[in-house]
Image: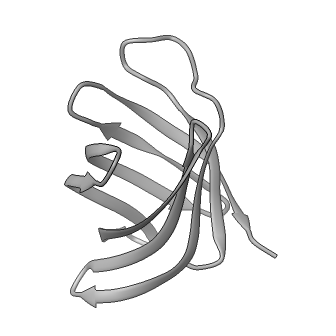
Amino acid sequence: MKGVTLVGRSTRTNSDQVAGEERYVISGTTKLTGETWLLRTRLQLGGRDIPVPLPVTIKWAGDTPVITLNELSIPGLGTYTARVVLYRDQYAGTWSGEHDGGQVFGKIVHNP
């Protein structure tokens, strides 16, 4: 997966509101070992644009990849656990951090 942007929104378990637009720009991927991949990303959240290389585990449910984070520390943002399913041009999943959690969902846009 490279040259794509995950464009979507997230929820929090302690609120009925849906957060504003979030963008996860993935410029490229590199296989590190086994199921571990490095996603070269820029996280665009809350008006911030943060370049972050994310080492993630990719599990497979048949033909469907599931991005897996386990207590991953992201500099400037915190420590997170997540499961995000990618299928066709959509994604959805759950996330949890040190003080909260919720769901993420949106579309996968192929960058020009």
Q: Quick check: 107 left or right of 69?
A: right
Quarter containing the C terminus: bottom right
Query: Residue 90 at what x, y percent from top left?
Result: 63, 54
Number of dots carrying numbers: 0
Q: Residue furthest right?
A: 112
Q: Quadrant of residue 88?
A: bottom right
Q: Is residue 7 above or below residue 17?
A: below
Q: Is residue 98 above or below residue 41?
A: above
Who is closer to the viewer here, 13 or 39?
A: 39
Closer-to-camera residue (50/108)? 50
Taking the spot 43% from the left edge, 68% from the top edge, the residue there is 65
Residue 26 percent coordinates (x, y) = 56, 70
Q: Is residue 84 left or right of residue 9?
A: left
- Quadrant containing the N terminus is bottom right
Instruction: Decide if residue 4 is on the left or right side of residue 77.
Output: right
* Residue drawn at the location 37% of the way across and 19% of the way down: 13
Its colouring scheme is one colour
Q: Position of residue 74 (x, y in %)?
A: 30, 54
**Residue at the image position 37 percent from the left and 62 percent from the top:** 67
Residue 2, given in percent of the width and then of the height, sits at: 59, 79
Residue at the spot x=33%, y=79% of the render?
37
> For residue 105, what is the image quadrant?
top right
Q: Is any part of residue 56 visible from this angle?
A: yes
- Determine if residue 63 is in view: no
Residue 92 vertical placement versus 87 (above, below): above
